[in-house]
Image (spheres, helix red, strand yellow):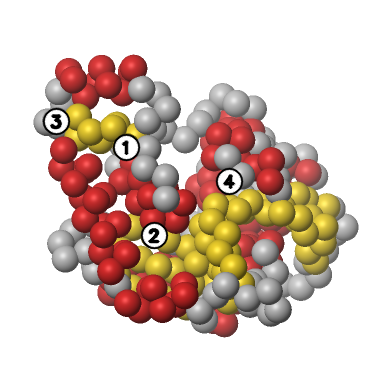
Amino acid sequence: MSGFTFSNHRIADELGDDTFYFADKTALSNSMLGILDESPTKFDLFLKGKWSYPSQSYFDIGTAVHNIYLEGVDNRLLVEGTRATKAYKLAKQENPDKLVLPTTDYNLVSSMVDKLHKVPELQEFVGRFTERQPELAATATVTTPSGNKIAVKGKGDLLLGDGFSAPTLLDLKTSAKGLSDWKRNAWYGSYPRQAYLYTELFQAEEFHFAVITKTFPYEVGIFKATPEFIAKGKKMFEDSVLQYEHLFIEGNYKPYSAVVGNI
């Protein structure tokens, strides 16, 4: 697919806070394109504010690891016991601005962050750069082959630079599976599209994933997105944008319709 161009690249400081970033629906993100791929109806309801991402407690571990390791911000609140206790549920209600974690998850986050700080390869990788900007949001305009202009956005975990060359992006992932499984499965999810989109948004030279497993001994991997990985992401991104254009710009979306075909 050809004919797509990016322009109007901008660091969007107003989207730096997660609350504002996820509330913004004026620009398409990788996760929003994932919703569109899964269900145009769900995507339409999301845009209209009639559906939102379900709250999943298992995301709390990854969020806490990101906050502490990347930004040095520890927003956890420890509650003794498990998520099934009344104390935990009450703490969630009374502390909406905190990451309320039961004992096991609280200790898990501490162990994972400690491991990240002690892995020499990760410290050497980050240490090569003199500039480190965590949780940075960027926007751009994508012009399709038909001439439609579509706003896109992304939020990079860690933008690394030396002040001279194009920056490098490092995206931190937590995984319930081993590193070999994560690396293999990464090709079949939305990660290629993320790598391509973020590389374009931040005009980055390289994109790397730092992955840490959620089980002892909390193995850490650093994986560079290859040209083949980025190329797959480019194809995924363009296919998703074309679907958005066809359904929601050209007016072909029909909420009460069936998918008809062969298998």
Q: Nearer the viewer, mark 2 or mark 1?
A: 1
Residue lying at the far left of the rendered structure: 81
Q: Position of residue 24 (x, y in %)?
A: 65, 36
Crowding around mark 4 (Cα neighbors within 10 Å: few <14, some 14 to 19, many 20+) is some
Type of residue at label 4? Met
Q: Secondary structure at mark 4?
A: helix
Residue lying at the far bottom of the rendered structure: 227
- Lower sequence index among marks 2 and 3: 3
Crowding around mark 3 (Cα neighbors within 10 Å: few <14, some 14 to 19, many 20+) is some
Quickly name the residue at label 3. 80
- Give the Cα separation between the discs numbered 1 and 3: 13 Å
Quickly name the residue at label 2. 173
Residue plotted at (21% across, 24% down): 88
- Give the Cα separation between the discs numbered 4 and 2: 18 Å
- Give the Cα separation between the discs numbered 4 and 1: 28 Å
Type of residue at label 1? Arg
Type of residue at label 3? Glu
Quickly name the residue at label 1. 76
Q: Image quadrant of residue 235?
A: bottom right
Name the foreground residue: 198 vs 113.
113
